[in-house]
Amino acid sequence: MRAHIGKLVKQRCSDRAIKMAVIPGGLTPYLQAGDVGIYKLFKDNISMLNEWKRSDKVSYTQAGNPRAPDISQVAPWVLQAWKETPL
């Protein structure tokens, strides 16, 4: 997708000190293993988020939408999930 390497995207990444890596077309079959293997396992391991959603710790907006958990809650979940993900 060319949109990912447009001037606006590059500028916004630069403004946020985000380093970009452009993967040339045709390499998806070689790189998709990370998406299917590693990232899927990581997502499966992040079950703490689903447990939180079912808990009584969720607060809601006036419109009835759930508020996102605080970063101090999420960071340990991500760290634990990453440690449990085989590389």
Image (cartoon, grey):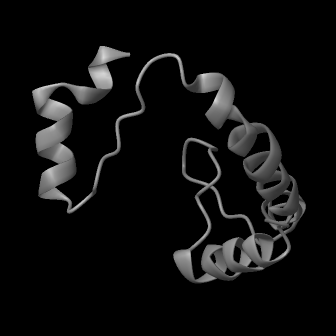
Q: How many marks?
A: 0
Viewed as shown, does residue 10 lie left or right of 61?
A: left
Q: Quadrant of the C terminus?
A: bottom right
Q: Residue at x 27, y 57 (%)?
A: 18
Residue 21 location, x and y as percent?
35, 44
Residue 27 location, x and y as percent?
55, 25
Q: Residue at x 73, y 71 (%)?
A: 82
Viewed as shown, does residue 2 lie left or right of 85?
A: left
- Name the foreground residue: 51 vs 4: 4
Q: Residue at x 87, y 66 (%)?
A: 55
Placement of 36 over or under 70, stated as above or below? above
Residue 20 location, x and y as percent?
30, 47
Q: Quadrant of the N terminus?
A: top left
Placement of 43 over or under 72, stated as above or below? above
Residue 6 lies in what quarter of the image?
top left
- Name the foreground residue: 33 vs 4: 33
Residue 80 location, x and y as percent?
77, 79
Viewed as shown, does residue 12 lie left or right of 55?
A: left
Residue 33 lies in what quarter of the image?
top right
Placement of 70 over or under 33, stated as above or below? below
